Amino acid sequence: MRLGIRLLFAFFLINGIAAFFVLRVFMAEIKPSVREVMEDMMVDTANILAELASDDLAAGRLAQGADNSSASPFAQHVRRYATRPIDAAIWGFSKQSLDYRIYVTDTTGRVLFDSENRAIGADYSQWRDVARTLRGEYGARSTRDVEDDDTSGVMHVAAPIYVQVPEGRKIAGVLTVAKPTRTVQRFIDRAERKVFMGGLLLLALSAAVGVAVTLWMVWNVRRLRDYALSVQGPADGERHDPGAPPTTALAVPEVPGELGDLARAMDRMRARLEGRDYIEGYVRALTHELKSPVAAIRGAGELLQDELPAADRTEFATQVVQQSERLQRIIDRLLELSKLEQRQHAEGRAPVALHDCAEAAIAQTRARAGQRGITLALQGHGTSGPWEAELVTLALTNLLDNAIDFAPAGSAVRVELDGATVAVQDSGPGVPDYALPRLGERFFTTARPGGERSGSGLGLAIVQRVMALHGGQMVARNTAPGLRVELVYRAA
């Protein structure tokens, strides 16, 4: 399972569990909270009405007659309350009825007054609201009109009615205020809907944040992965030049926090590993190339210690000089290449004309070409660009040296300019097709027309590096006869 899918799965699992329990708590708390507020208000109402009813109860005026009439001013006010017209808008809901039922019992629990005339004379002494209040405790109860219907519940809150006696105040009765819970059910339902929709919105927002965080994390991790892949060695089966410079890696990704620390640590590790691998490959390849001329010099030197004919002595002395020159060429080219590989880019300031660089390269190689009877020709004018003149000239000089080595005596080597492209064309035997992809590898050489391998194998490596510093490329192909090498510079 991929990292992004795992992160998303873990986030949604944790978020879903948390949302489930949080929503469940909120939904479970709405109904009791509303009813607690409702009970608190009924406590105040019951105590106010109990004070208002105390004088009428003490005077015996609360008891209702057979016609449900009462001489009590309190009873008359309560009945007028029950018939009052009402049209109130409460937070978007319309209230058009008054829902309090008020009844009063005496000290024995018998109902003296009932605003709805439902229980006059009934014995309520066993009801929790009346019984507890008569004992001086807080009395309240909730009773369902329909046993299995939670919405049919009625909340009853009682308050004691005190009367003055010579000894002080005593409980002379109980006033109970009753209110159906269905009157607040619509407020509960609306609150539950709002909480539920808010919970869904919160879940959606948190999911969006989770997706964003996951994508951000996966993106940064993939950048680190791509960076790691760009600096690793070649896979099994891939061709690798042991003396080639380290592969150009992606820039160190700029990522925050611990991922940034990891990226920088990877970059330091890459630098150490590349330096070690580079030096190891360099030394191995250099040792291989130096072995042949050193062995030839040693063999010739040992023979020269003996008495030899003048012709043989001259031959072996010439061999020592030639192999020494070969060693010198290898060392000089290695120094040039080493300098180039330490640089990250060319330093082109003013526009440089390719024509001028080509003329300079031809001037440097004309004497050597003349020794071999080879003519150097320049065609075209080319363009100008922000290139480094010395490096462009160095690359062309190495190409011309290479072409002179392979061109037959009496032939011509042409330098052709076309825009930002410079081509060097010879009329030699070319190179085998299998060798074309390897041109530019350090120490890779092909046999000269005479069968010898006197080259250093570093000339085209220098050309390749010069092109890399300029952001261009070297393209070689056989033209039968000859080899054509094009240097394509990146235009400004």
Image (cartoon, helix red, strand yellow):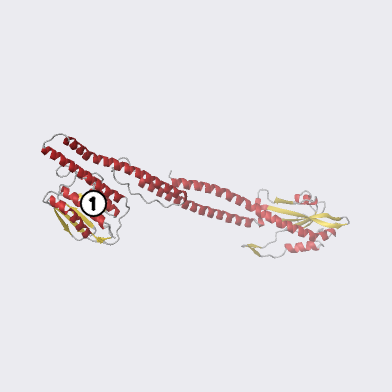
Left or right of 186 on screen, residue 210: left
The residue depicted at 29 percent of the width and 52 percent of the height is 468
Where does label 1 land, which residue?
475
Question: Number of marks in the image?
Answer: 1
Quarter of the picture holding the N terminus:
top left
The residue depicted at 82 percent of the width and 56 percent of the height is 162
Residue kind at label 1, given as amino acid type? Val
Q: Which residue is nearer to you in this view: 431 or 290?
A: 290
**Residue 287 is drawn in which quadrant?**
top left
* Residue 182, position as x, y percentages in the image: 66, 55
Left or right of 6 on screen, residue 52: right
* Residue 339, position as x, y percentages in the image: 29, 50
The residue depicted at 13 percent of the width and 40 percent of the height is 314
Q: Secondary structure at mark 1?
A: strand
Left or right of 45 on screen, residue 194: left
Q: Residue furthest top?
A: 306
* Residue 172, position as x, y percentages in the image: 83, 55
Quarter of the picture holding the C terminus:
bottom left
- Determine if residue 33 is in view: yes
Q: Which residue is nearer to you in this view: 227 or 242?
A: 242
**Residue 117 is drawn in which quadrant?**
bottom right
- Determine if residue 67 is in view: no
